[in-house]
Structures are given as C-alpha cells and as structure tokens.
Image (cartoon, rainbow, N blue to C red):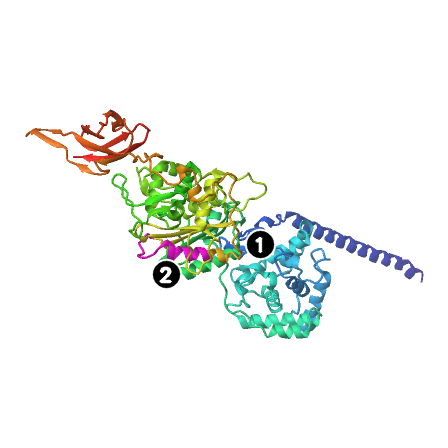
Amino acid sequence: MTASATIAPANGSRRWRRVKIAGIAFAAMCLAVTGVFAAWVISLPPLPLEHARRGSITVVDRHGKLLRAYAMADGRWRLPVDARTDVDPRYIGLLLAYEDQRFRSHHGVDPLALGRAALQLVTRGHIVSGGSTITMQLARLMEPRQQRSVYAKLHQIVRAVELERQLSKDEILDLYLMLAPFGGNLEGVRAASLAYFGKEPKRLSLAESALLVALPQSPERRRLDRHPDVARVARDRVLRRMVEEGQISNEDAARAMRMPVPRLRQQMPILAPHSTDRAISILKNRPAIQLTLDSTIQRSLETLAHDRAAAMGPDISVGILVVDHATGEVIAHIGSPDYFDERRAGQVDMTRAVRSPGSTLKPFIYGLAFEDGFVNPESLIDDRPSRYGNYAPENFDMKFQGTVTVRHALQMSLNVPAIALLDRVGSSRLSARIKQAGAELILPKDEAPGLAMGLGGVGITLSDLVQLYAGLARLGSTVPLREIARTGHGSEPDFRRLLDPSAAWQVGNVLLGTPPPLNAPRHRIAFKTGTSYGYRDAWSVGFDGRYAIGVWVGRADGVPVPGQLGRTAAAPILFDAFARTGKLPLPLARAPRGTLVASNTKLPLPLRRFRPAGDLLRTGGEQPLKIQFPLNGSRIDASDMVSESETTLLPLPVKVAGGELPMTMLVNGISVGEIDSRRQRMVKPPGKGFVRLTVMDATGAADTVVVRIQ
C-alpha cells in the first residue's frame, strides 16, 4: 500500500508533463501556422483594381445612352455598369437571392452559406449550391486560377475580405456585374444583354433576368449561340428555386419558362460611327466619351439616309448634319447611309468631304448686298444676258425672266442676278467674310476668288455649310460646331461675324418663302438647294427657329449622276429630316429693330432698282453711262503692217452712250484724255493682250470693258 501510494503521484506528474509538452507544441504549431499565414497574406500583391476596372471604350449621347462601344484589345466586350441606374432591379434581386442572400450583411465570407454548401454536398452527393459569395466570385474573376483547391479557396477568402475593406457594397456589385462571364468574349451583364437581347439591361423581363443569373455559373457550357437548350434548363432551374424561396409566384415562373431562349448573338450598337471614330481619335485615352448627339434622332435619320440612298441606286451616298444653331451642338451626324457598304465608300464621312456647293452660297451674296444697302428684298433686278469679260453666266434652265424682284431671284435661284450682285459685292470680299465666319472655301491651286464661286466654282464641306446657315438663323453670328460634350464649365463659344443682324434676317425671310418640295409644308423652313456642275453634288440646307440641317446627295467618288438635282434629290430628305426630329418647326427670329420692310413703291428711290457698278441713280431723263464700242470681252485685230519686218497697232475707236460731259478716258487705269462732244475718242492700245478701258463722266459714274488686242 505504501509503495503504490508512492508511485501514483509520480505517474500523474509524468502524464501532466506530456500533456503540457503537447499543448506547448500545439500552440507553437498554431503560432507557426498563424505566422506563415500572416506572412503569406502580407506578401500578397495589392488587389489589381485598376486593371479590373479597365473595359471597353464607350461613347454615349447627350442623355447618356450608348451610341457605340469598342471591343478591348484582346477582343473582349466589357462595358461599365452601375447597378443602381443601369440594371433592372428585378435582375439584381434574383441575382442576390440565388447567389448571395446575405450580400449586404456579411464581410466578404458567409459562414452559413459555406456550411450549407458542405452539408448539401455530403447529404446529396453533388453540389446543390455554392458557398462563394459575390465578393469571393469577384476575387476569383480578378485573379483567375485554373485549378480548384483548398489553397485557391483560401486565397479567394482572403481577397474577399480585402475587397470588403477597400470597396463599398455598391462598388463590389458594380465590378462583379462588369466582370462576370457570359460566354465567348462577353463579360458583364450589360454586354450580355446587348448581345443576346439587343437592349440595355434596364428593362429585362423575368425570363431574361433568370437567364442572365444562370449563365455565369457555367458560361461556356450554357452559351446561347452554341448550347441554347442547356441554357434554357439552367434558366428554368433558377426560376424553380426562386419559387421555392418565395421570390416569385408559380404563375410568373410558368409564364417565364414558356419564353424562348435567344439562339443568336446580335450586333453591338454602332450608332454614329463616323462621329464615334473621330471622337476616340481625338480623346485617345478616355474610357468613356459623351457626345452632343441625340441617339433617337440619330437612329431615325440613319434609317432615313439608308432608305433614300437604297431607292436612288447602289452607288449613291447621303450625308446629313443636324445642328442646334443656338449652341453649335451637333444633334445628328450621318456621314454615309451604311458604314459597312464598300460600294458606297461607307466609311468616308461625306459631311467632311470637300465638294462643289452649287448655288448654296447665293444667300451669302445677297446677305452682303443687303448689308451694303444697295438692294432690298423688294428691289427690282434684271435677269438678262450679261457678260463679265469672258464669263457669261446663264440660268439653269437657259432662260431669262427679265425684271424680277431680288426676293424672287433668290427664291428661284436665278444665276444672272446673283452674279450681278457678286460683281458689285466682290468675290474676294465674299470669300473673306465666309472665312471670317469660320468656314473654309477651297479654291483650285493658285486660283483667286472669282465670280464663278457664286455658282459653285469652289469647294466646301457640308459641315462648314451648315455652320454658315446656322449663322443666318442666329441673325448673323456663327459658332463653331461641336460634337464632343463639354466637361465642367468650359470657355464661352467663339462667336464670329457673318452678316449684320438685319441682313441675316432678310435672307432668312426670303428663304422662308422658297417653294418647298411636293406635299411639303410652306413657310415653315428657310432653305436653299444647290446642284454642282455636272450633277455631281445635290444639296439642300435649311433652318427653323431651333435646328439647322444640311443634306448632301451624290457619289462618294465624284462620278456625275445625270438628272440628280438638289431640289428633287436633297430637298425632300431635308424636309423629312426636320419631321423626324420629333419636334414641330419653331418660327424664325423676329426682325431686328431698324430693319427696312416695305413694298417696292415705298422703298427709297435708290433701292427700288439694282444698278450694276458704274451706274448712278438719275432723276431726269438722261441715260446711264455705257461704253457701246468695243464690247466687253471682244477680240480686236489692231495690227497694221508697216513693212515685212515691222507692225504697229492702229488706234482703237471708243464710243460712249449716255452720261454727262465732260468724260475722262482711262486705259489700264491711266488717264489718256477726255471724250469729245460726240462721245467718241481714238485710243492707242498700249500693246497686244488684255486692255481695260474705263470711261468716267462728270457725276462720277463709270463703265469699264476689257478687250483683247491681237
């Protein structure tokens, strides 16, 4: 008894020492594991948030609606999304109910979900539901791993906790909705909705929402364009589970299950391709770009251009530009009827192509004439044969209408009166004023502005032409056209002078009365048409109180289209374009104070009839000064052979009618004496070639002819 009692305490002591040693060893091991784990966590690189946030470049309209997206460099479509504004709330509700019911309350890991998933795996022998939270799935998407393992799951858990510490719940959800795979090169719910349903995910049906919830679980096996039946089974599984959890009713689920599943992908939106291409070439590194365009009007006018071009022939192209003339913002920009039509050169932006404007510059000739004060819209002007050196303008129909009002001459686009006014205004002055207003006229190399520019003998773009017409609507001031929306408080627009306000209003008032195309409303739109030489370009440009719109029709390669006129080809498109803006035409601005509005008989005497340069108003019965001989532009043989080796030039007789004596004779601007009482004089030519002969009478009236001496 004594011996055993002595041994027992010793055995207990040894056991206690072993337990103590084991405990110390276990604690040391735990500390070591903890230390290794901590070291591993510390050694992890920072979360690749910036890389994950990179997506497709998107271009949106003035209201934030998608115009076009560009695939990433590796071909993937990944569009940014805001769960609160860009996605149907029902889809968000289904997603969280199916994937992560406690998303708003956990801190990256849901122990209850992990435990439930493990229990279901043990009891049923297969995976019923996953234990990964939305945050853990996002971590896997940001750092994808090929193999599933305990290490990979532990890595997800650690990264999920990091994400929860660095981002808000809304930011995590937005990033997940941007990166979730949907098969092929589609990432994110927005790209999937556009590709599969052809619409933004703002208004998804229940069937569509359930389908988009199911696809990311196995995106390649459930690809709609390859395995639509598998995708349908997965969608129905989501719907049945939502019924079990009380998220939706049996009736709604049954109705959704009857909906077909899309089997083909749709093309990504590609509105305003010329505008979007130019925008990303200017703003190369900006992930999201906003334009001033209105996608609704843009889509409608793209359809209009496509339909009209198709009706006119396989080679015809159409360009349309719509501008808010108050701000200079471009509302719609159609560079061609079909961007992908090679035969029409669809990728050539015809709003920026330099073409002959035909008669569309005439309103600015008349505007300068109104500004200078030598004509009024009700002034009379002669439409009769005229010659300016070697240039003899003719009307389009080869007829002359005699004496007409200036208003009628512009509305009917008569060529002869327009050139008479341009001769008085000056071609160089017209060119300089247009340049001052911000537009550019393209002349042939080494050519100076001439009278032919009034009928289209110059190049201009549709964009510049619309800017000029917008200046008429603005009562004489232009602003640069702008397609890229301003960010923040930009500088004030650069206003440029085109015409005086009264002159601009008078031009608009005249154009408002231009006869419209068949069945189009009258006195709603101030517009002008034009047809370039050889039927290469048909134009129509007009404005109301809100918009200025320009239309060009022709072939992109410049080949003539016989019979194609601005009035019949472009003007109907112009009026349809105004109608398709969805707004009734606004009236033009009121006449500025001081604008002279009167009938011809009530105009001041000098304004009742236009008189060409050199003619003065006379109150008596005397005739205006006129050189009767030689005729302007004539060729005269004045050679006199003195001997076989020598010739001289004979004196040239000059005969004048009208005017008041005394009269002075000038040759090439140099006085050579006075005209005699019979209104004649012999003038010795200074040499062979062109000679300018001018006669000036006592009142200052003058007449000039240019002849060629041979």
Residue 155: in sight, yes or no? no
The image quadrant of residue 637 is top left
**Residue 369: where, in percent of width, then height?**
40, 39
**Residue 168: where, in percent of width, then height?**
68, 52
Judging by the rendered image, the residue that carries numbered circle 1 is 80
Of badges 1 and 2, the one in the foreground is: 2
Q: Give the range drawn in magenta.
A: 557-576
Q: Is residue 30 left or right of residue 508?
A: right
| Residue 573 painted magenta | yes
From this view, report whether residue 116 is shown above or below residue 607: below
Q: Is residue 602 left or right of residue 593?
A: left
Element carrying mark 2: helix
Residue at 54% in and 46% down = 485
Residue at 23% in and 36% down = 628
Residue 590: in sight, yes or no? yes
| Residue with the most extreme left position | 644
Residue at 92% in and 60% down = 5
Total numbered circles: 2
The circle on residue 699 is none
Q: In this view, does 674 lie to the left or right of 494?
A: left
Q: Which amino acid does label 1 sit on?
A: Pro
> Closer to the camera, 401 or 115?
401
Element carrying mark 1: loop
> Closer to the camera, 60 or 568?
568
Among the two numbered marks 1 and 2 on one chain, the one whose residue lies closer to the N terminus: 1
Quadrant assignment for the C terminus? top left
Q: Which amino acid does label 2 sit on?
A: Met
Quadrant assignment for the N terminus? bottom right
Judging by the rendered image, the residue that carries numbered circle 2 is 312
